[in-house]
Image: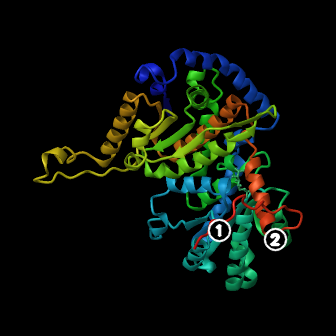
Amino acid sequence: MKLQYGRVIQDGLDGTHGLPRRRLDELARRFGAIQAEVRERREAGEYGFYGLARQENTVRQIAAFAEGLGQAHDHVLVLGIGGSALGARALLSALRPPAWNELDDEAREFFPRLTLLDNVDPTSVAAALRRIDPRRVLVNVISKSGGTAETLAQYLVVRKWLDDALGGAASRHLVFTTDPERGALRELATSEGIATLEVPPDVGGRFSVLSPVGLLPAALVGIDIAALVAGAARAVATAEEGDLLKNPAALFAALHWAADTQLGARVHVVMPYSDRLRDVAEWFRQLWAESLGKRVDREGQVVHTGPTPVASVGATDQHSQVQLFMEGPFDKLITFVTVADPGEDVLIPVLEGMPEEVACLGGRTLGELLQAEYEATSAALAQMGRMNSTIALSDLAAQSVGELLMFFQLATGYAGCWYGVNPFDQPGVELGKRLTFGALGRVGYEPPAPPLDADADTA
Ligand code: PA5
């Protein structure tokens, strides 16, 4: 994995925009203090996700557990939201063939189908339960706190559906992934003898993709979770490098922070040129937003800081957002993700009589076209003075995906220090959770305040 950052620097752009090269030297000089802070905080137990790169025993246990369960069920239904859902979705899209649930048993190598519900939209939940056979399903309920309203509501609906179909056998179709001690799910598991996996207490939701939160669903559909974790270990090893320019995760963080705070580039786009990485971009969006968007800094000063992450996909969004990226405000840093060997390619046939202006497509491959689209977009943006960098992956094997996911988490950990905020809390999300329970009338919880304006319903 490489981070190509030349087009973030002024002399790699139009000579006017971008970070002056001397700024890069300043960042490199300050990096020693940033790295020391990360190390100190790691020792104090804050950066628990680093430990997910060293968990051979857990990986073996999850793989064995999944093998038994996977053989007994042909559908996995995952219930969760936010950090308890986005990672599993990213792994499934990146590492299993597209349209997984539409493939027959043989094409899926007899691994189960997987449906992930990360909302309480009644139409999606009802449709999923109509589609799935409760006799053949394994339901993995994922919630670190064990008390998130959406996930618990999903659970109650699904539990009744299981009870109605299976009676006393329902609990054998359930696995909870939750905190080892606290929360409603843990209580339910203990009282009903439901199987559980533990979310390590020092790993927060959005940093948990490489914990049992992401690893169990991944292993159930046949993803090589040992390779994923090995990739993550590679990223952690690289992130120990003391020279900023040889430490891609730290460099990603430093460049984004400097672009935001010095050049006003507070919109951070991640744009893979790969459909399989679309959900990785969505996962990154949550990681970056929830970790860095904060009201107060580490000192308790009100700062209202944080970049706005945007998920995009090439070449699709060249026809949707790229006009804005090229000519709109100079408020963005765009990171492309490219994959040298996508594992499959399709020849564009040569057809007699094709008009000359499009005839050059014939005889090339779709992969070549995608690569050309990326190169052209990156170069055109640079010509327009628009900062862009590229994460270049060699392939989309489990190891590379594990490395990429850990890379983004490490970058977020470093970015927390550059921004001076705690990347591991989410008081804003917690407030919304409390007010939701208040709105539902839970004793001891305030309901949300009514809107200031009267309803403008003129019908
Ligand atoms: O990253 C986070 O902490 C959040 O996005 C949580 O993952 C999300 O709110 C769900 O929480 P829980 O796993 O406790 O149900």
x, y percent for residue 96:
49, 57
Q: Is residue 446 left or right of residue 379?
A: right
x, y percent for residue 334:
49, 36
Name the residue nearer the viewer: 345 or 376: 376
Name the residue nearer the viewer: 203 or 33: 33
Q: Secondary structure at mark 1?
A: loop
Judged from the image, the quadrant occupied by ligand 1 is bottom right
The residue at 56%/61% (across/down) is 221
Quickly name the residue at label 1. 120
Please, is residue 383 above or below residue 429 in the view? above
Q: Secondary structure at mark 2?
A: loop
User: For residue 118, what is the image quadrant?
Assistant: bottom right
Q: Which residue occupies the extreme front position in the image? A: 458
Q: Which residue occupies the extreme left position in the image? A: 353
Q: What amino acid is labelled 1 in the image? A: Val
Q: Residues within 10 Å of mark 1 (few under 14, many from 20)?
A: some
The residue at 63%/30% (across/down) is 239
Q: Is residue 421 visible?
A: yes
The residue at 69%/63% (across/down) is 454
